[in-house]
Amino acid sequence: MKHALVVHEGRASEAIERDGQLLLGDGRRAAFDAVTWLPPLLQPAPQPRTILALGLNYADHAKELAFKAPEEPLVFLKGENALTGHRQATRRPAGVGFMHYECELTVVVGRTARNVKRADAYDFIAGYTVANDYAIRDYLENWYRPNLRVKNRDRATPIGPWLVDAADVPDPMALALRTTVNGKVTQSGNTRDMIFDVPFLIEYFSSFMTLRPGDLILTGTPDGVVDCRAGDVIVTEIEGLGALENRIVSSGGEKRGQSPISA
């Protein structure tokens, strides 16, 4: 099942996809373009949410950035303020030279996980969604250790539109990924090409920290990243999970050839 969290007529509501529309929690239906989409985190986490994000988890992306593929996961933490929803806007700061998307399979933890074995990892996953984890290369301390300004900017990580139940994703390690910029395909890949796959990551993280319901793991992006400018419409899509749309606005809110949208 595909779950969403939306604002309809001024009220937040959980929703599911039903026959090409949203079935709201109160039983009413709404068109996709009649709501404001929020990150599909269906209830507040019972404690501060941990957001773990992988760097260089695809060998082709590491090569693209002229780095050797890592032998151990390169991981950084993100704050929840970095998240935004489907069809929202992300700002490009003034004066930056290179800001690019990152289409990423995102794992949503469903059960408290500690010392989980790889063979049992999928039992601890609630579902999957799509993230677009924008990076601003100008702000990197170096190419493999993102600092706060690169990966923790407010609303610089769109996520959604759906949270898809794990039971409806038979093999998360065989999903096609694709990104388009203004309708042109600029990135394509497959989750099978991850260096560290989802079961490994669950085992790895839970070996030294507790994962709790609602925690997120962003699993990295393949090669094919390009610079994104104000006015660009970016769609990051993962097979079976949906297409996440985002627009770039300048630091002043202007966009080329587009009327302003919610940011």
Image (cartoon, rainbow, N blue to C red):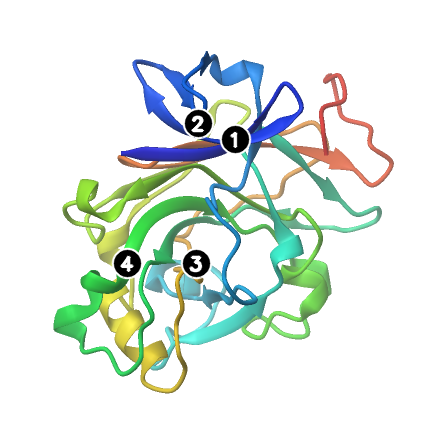
Q: Which residue is mark 1?
A: 13
Q: Which residue is mark 3?
A: 214
Say left or right for 51 vs 108. right
Whether residue 8 is visible to the viewer of this picture, yes or no, is: yes
Callout 2 amino acid: Gly
Q: Are the residues flagged by discs 3 and 1 in contact, CB closer than 8 Å?
A: no
Q: Determine crowd level at label 3: few under 14, some 14-19, many 20+ residues with C-alpha closer than 10 A.
A: many
The disc, 1 or 4, on the residue closer to the chain's N-terminal end is: 1
Q: Residue furthest front?
A: 26
Callout 4 amino acid: Ile
Q: The residue tagged with tag 2: helix, strand or loop?
A: loop
Q: Quadrant of the N terminus?
A: top left
Q: Are the residues flagged by discs 2 and 1 in contact, CB closer than 8 Å?
A: yes
Q: Quadrant of residue 84?
A: top right
The disc, 2 or 1, on the residue closer to the chain's N-terminal end is: 1
Callout 3 amino acid: Gly
- Where's residue 263, x and y in %? 72, 34
The disc, 3 or 1, on the residue closer to the chain's N-terminal end is: 1
**Res. 125 mark:** 4
Tell me how far mark 3 sits from mark 1, CA to CA. Answer: 18 Å
Q: The residue tagged with tag 3: helix, strand or loop?
A: loop
Q: Residue at x 53, y 72 (%)?
A: 76
Q: Which residue is mark 2?
A: 25
Q: The residue tagged with tag 1: helix, strand or loop?
A: strand
Q: Residue at x 21, y 68 (%)?
A: 121
- Where's residue 241, x and y in %? 32, 37
- Where's residue 128, x and y in %? 33, 48
The disc, 4 or 3, on the residue closer to the chain's N-terminal end is: 4
Whether residue 179 is visible to the viewer of this picture, yes or no, is: no
